[in-house]
Image (spheres, rainbow, N blue to C red):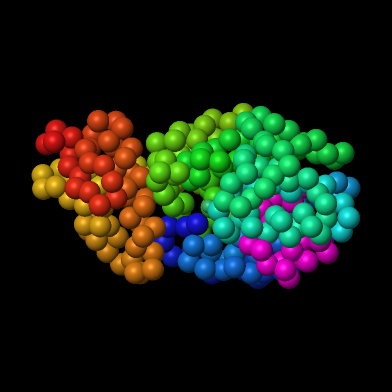
Amino acid sequence: MTDTTEVDPPRPPSLVPGVPSALSPLVRRIVAPNPGMMTGPGTNTYLVGIDEIVVIDPGPANDPHLDAIVACGSDRIRWIVCTHTHEDHAPGVAGLKKRTGAEVLAFDSRDGLIIDRPLAEGDRIEATEFVLRALHTPGHASNHLCFLLEQERLLFSGDHIMNGSTVVIRPPDGDMAVYLQHLERLKDHRPRLNAIAPGHGHLIGEPLAKIDEYLQHRRQRESQILKVLERGTPTTVDAIVASLYTDIVEELRPMAAATVWAHLRKLDQEGRAQGGDLDGPWVAADQG
Ligand SMILES: [Zn+2]
């Protein structure tokens, strides 16, 4: 799901839904037909492997999309994994499981997703041609996993990192402090990441630059929020959104509010702001 403050660049045709594109010798991508303000061009479903295939994020329960995945992977789909259980990533699992009999793996069974086996930090899926390793990356969702294709140092980032927009952090399941810690952690990953395959948008060829951009964007937003609080008058999340997101479309206001609230909760944990819930009021800590 995306925040909305940035305008997406024009999309080349390779992100057209239903058309598989080869991204590397081991990886193919099929975009689900669910484009939108929150999903960009649609959810990216990835097929990793040739002899034995892992499908990452089947997306919504859309029959033509699931049929396209099966047409691409035929009877070699052995595993289905989910980065997290949001509605644009996981509901297609049941239909794909039915079509393939593949084993379903994710952090946990939640939001209607039923798994065969949980994956935790460091767990590996070992196929004949490759190893896919799970990294627990909470923040956007507490059950969020990224997957590292070790042979290519390619990270499937789900909604932890996207291309074309920033990530919504929606408390209480979303947590800004935890999110930023896990971005920093990816930055320090060794061996260095070669590329990032996001849940939405194009392949990211310069992982470190993208992660830095994300961190900087969040720091900037946080200092803007602190400045509003430091005016001294108790304020609300809605008032902060109105002051900072001046040209936001109405439909996206709840997402902006969630993210501002997530920033405030982080500032509260750090003793820099005081307040409580989405309805406020919030003040800078030294005025509380
Ligand atoms: Zn999500």
Q: Find residue 132 and report its image quarter.
A: top right
Magenta span has 68? yes
Q: Quadrant of the C terminus?
A: top left
The residue drawn where x is 23% and y is 34% is: 272
196 left or right of 243? right
Magenta span has 71? yes
Residue 99 in the image, given as x and y percentages of width and height: 81, 59
Q: Which residues are magenta?
A: 53-72
The residue drawn where x is 27% and y is 36% is: 268
The residue drawn where x is 78% and y is 45% is: 103
Residue 95 in the image, given as x and y percentages of width and height: 74, 60
Is residue 20 among the parts visible in the rendering?
no
Q: Measured along the vertical axis of the image, is residue 64 above or below residue 21?
A: below
The residue drawn where x is 26% and y is 42% is: 276
Q: Measured along the vertical axis of the image, is residue 188 above or below residue 142?
A: above
User: Is 244 in front, or is 138?
Assistant: 138
User: Is 42 in front, or is 196?
Assistant: 42
234 left or right of 166? left
Residue 258 in the image, given as x and y percentages of width and height: 36, 52
Residue 216 in the image, given as x and y percentages of width and height: 39, 43
Q: Measured along the vertical axis of the image, is residue 201 above or below residue 223?
A: below
166 left or right of 145? left
